[in-house]
């Protein structure tokens, strides 16, 4: 059987030009079952890519456009009001018919920074605990998006502690402003011949994702990869002088979740042993946790860790 992730990747590549990081982030998110934060301007195919993944994996998809009056009930289902006449008078009950993030496999929460604090806090708690009351929810991954421009005059951007709940973080930049003229040509070529509908994607099915989640547990992380992770964290803190005031290098994210993403990277590549190239997924821990200036250097550092191995092996 062909690797389901090759199919997912090629379906994304077929319909969306560029945005390799967002594509990888989505694959990592559904395999590792971690939440994803994508920051980028409108119209950069964020929604489309999420739809392709969910259609292909036959996931129950919930899309919600956040706004400044978003109430929690809109995210967790429908409010139903019931009346009952009793001898003591009328009793009015308010129940929720579960839906939204409580019953979907994957959800896209557009413009998350617009949600008012009270809804946002409860939403983030549900996402974090993956529970509603005592019950587990089926959600694999929540994808939150936000527009980078500072036009959110009525609301603050998500604070770092809230952003930290989205383990996987990625920037999505427009290809025109990015001056990626080859990609610009490709998109125009694509729409000159096709209409870009997401209706006919090859199906990999949800079972493929369940199987891959199972196989995560069996991925071996050899000592050299563990050492690579240690040296990357050492580099961030010692060489780049990251500390509590300029970054969010939490032990949970960098010492625990990092390993889960490394394993997911191996699974996506059809391996049950991680290697140094899997360390490159660590770049998805950085965008909104560390100062922007060091992002590029960090990617180079991760490349150099991969190449070190090649040298010593020769
Ligand atoms: N890189 C791209 N490749 C192919 N189509 C694109 C690309 N960028 C934008 N589009 C087109 O623009 C539309 C708008 O994208 P959408 O997913 O709604 O963006 P966003 O959710 O980022 O606002 C897409 O449905 C697609 O038709
Ligand atoms: Mg969108």
Image (tube, rainbow, N blue to C red):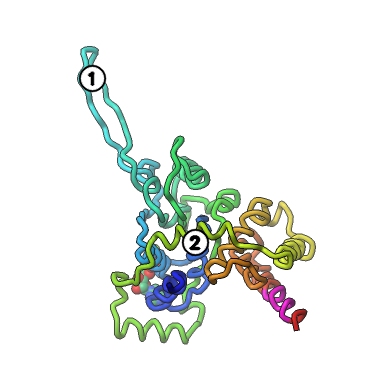
Ligand 1: which quarter?
Answer: bottom left
Numbered tag placed on residue 126 in the rendering: none
Residue found at the very far front of the displayed protein: 1
Q: Is mark 2 within 8 Å of ligand 1?
A: no
Residue plotted at (37% across, 51% down): 104
Task: Locate residue 290, reporting x and y percent.
Answer: 66, 61
Dominant secondary structure of the residues highlighted in magenta in the image:
helix
Residue plotted at (27% across, 25% down): 92
In the picture provided, is 75 more to the left or to the right than 282? left
Q: What residue sits right under mark 2 in the picture? A: 212
In the picture provided, is 216 more to the left or to the right than 139? right
Residue found at the very far right of the displayed protein: 238
In the picture provided, is 200 more to the left or to the right than 23? left
Dot 1 or dot 2, earlier in sequence: 1
Q: What residue sits right under mark 1 in the picture? A: 90
Q: Nearer the viewer, residue 260 or 177?
A: 260
Q: Nearer the viewer, mark 1 or mark 2?
A: 2
Position of 218 relative to 183 (above/below): above
């Amino acid at each position: 059987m062909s690797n389901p992730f090759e199919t997912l990747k090629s379906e994304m590549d077929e319909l969306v030009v560029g945005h390799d990081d967002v594509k990888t982030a989505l694959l990592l998110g559904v395999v590792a079952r971690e939440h994803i934060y994508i920051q980028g301007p409108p119209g950069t195919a964020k929604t489309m890519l999420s739809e392709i993944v969910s259609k292909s994996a036959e996931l129950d998809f919930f899309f919600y456009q956040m706004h400044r009056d978003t109430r929690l009930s809109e995210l967790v289902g429908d409010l139903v009001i019931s009346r009952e006449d009793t001898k003591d008078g009328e009793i009015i009950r308010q129940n929720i018919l579960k839906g939204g993030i409580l019953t979907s496999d994957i959800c896209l929460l557009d413009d998350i920074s617009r949600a008012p604090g009270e809804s946002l806090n409860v939403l983030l708690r549900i996402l974090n605990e993956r529970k509603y009351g005592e019950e587990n929810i089926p959600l694999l991954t929540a994808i939150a998006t936000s527009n980078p421009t500072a036009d959110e005059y009525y609301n603050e951007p998500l604070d770092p502690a809230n952003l930290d709940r989205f383990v996987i973080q990625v920037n999505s930049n427009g290809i025109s402003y990015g001056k990626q003229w080859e990609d610009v040509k490709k998109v125009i070529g694509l729409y000159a011949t096709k209409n870009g509908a997401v209706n006919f994607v090859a199906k990999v099915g949800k079972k493929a994702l369940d199987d891959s989640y199972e196989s995560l547990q069996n991925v071996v992380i050899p000592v050299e990869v563990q050492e690579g992770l240690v040296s990357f964290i050492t580099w961030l803190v010692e060489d780049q002088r990251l500390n509590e005031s300029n970054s969010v290098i939490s032990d949970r994210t960098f010492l625990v979740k990092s390993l889960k993403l490394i394993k997911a990277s191996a699974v996506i590549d059809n391996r049950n042993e991680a290697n140094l190239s899997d360390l490159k997924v660590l770049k998805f821990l950085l965008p909104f946790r560390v100062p922007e200036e060091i992002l590029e250097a960090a990617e180079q550092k991760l490349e150099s860790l991969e190449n070190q191995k090649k040298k010593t092996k020769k």
